[in-house]
Amino acid sequence: MHEVVAGALVREGRVLLVHRSPYRRAYPDVWDLPGGHVEPGESKLTALAREMQEELGVAIATDSASHLCRLEAGRGADSVRFSAWLVVDWQGAPTNIAPEEHDEIRWFRPAELPPLAHGSLGPVLVDVIRSRRT
């Protein structure tokens, strides 16, 4: 089973989402949280920090991250355990520095959330955005 982490960067009542490239093998052409695979020997938070740096150019404060949810998808060798984290403290301005992975990044308010790669994540994000005004 593949371990995947993703971060919900939330600020001023909005969450940052990435639009996955239509050329991606898994979940092409959909909106999602930024993130990626946990490498062997990495903790989930270390992987989350690395992925946020690689994809968005931001340095997250891992002590500001709190676990949102865990989802499992797929079967067999393609199965994935997906952990989403709320991140409220980071340094740097999020920028799409991984255009081969996603073709757009954008901030969304709860009422504007598009359909997500993992549909059950939407209500979780709406709740957390509405409860935090950071």
Image (spheres, rainbow, N blue to C red):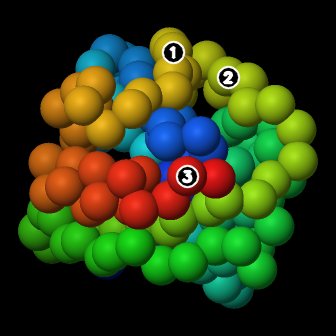
The amino acid type of the residue labelled 3 equals: Arg
The amino acid type of the residue labelled 1 equals: Glu
Image coordinates for residue 31, horizontal then vertical, percent: 33, 30
Indicate which disc residue 104 carries: 1
Is 113 on the left or on the right of 109, as rendered?
left
Mark 1 / mark 2, whichever is N-terminal: 2
Q: Residue at x 42, y 52 (%)?
A: 129
Mark 3 / mark 1, whichever is N-terminal: 1
Distance between mark 1 and mark 2 Cα atoms: 7 Å
- Picture quarter containing residue 33? top left
Q: In the rendered image, which quarter contains the N terminus? A: bottom left
Distance between mark 3 and mark 2 Cα atoms: 24 Å
Q: Residues within 10 Å of mark 2 (few under 14, many from 20)?
A: some
Image coordinates for residue 124, horizontal then vertical, percent: 26, 61
Q: Mark 2 and mark 3 in contact (Cβ < 8 Å)? A: no
Q: Mark 1 and mark 3 in contact (Cβ < 8 Å)? A: no
Mark 3 / mark 2, whichever is N-terminal: 2
Q: Mark 2 and mark 1 in contact (Cβ < 8 Å)? A: yes
Q: Nearer the viewer, residue 125 or 39?
A: 125
Q: In this rendering, does residue 9 appear at all? A: no
Q: Residues within 10 Å of mark 1 (few under 14, many from 20)?
A: some
The amino acid type of the residue labelled 2 equals: Asn
Q: Disc 3 or disc 1, which is closer to the eye?
A: 3
Residue topped by disc 2 = 96
Q: Residues within 10 Å of mark 3 (few under 14, many from 20)?
A: few
Residue topped by disc 3 = 133
Rendered position, 82 above or below 106: below
Image coordinates for residue 7, horizontal then vertical, percent: 54, 56
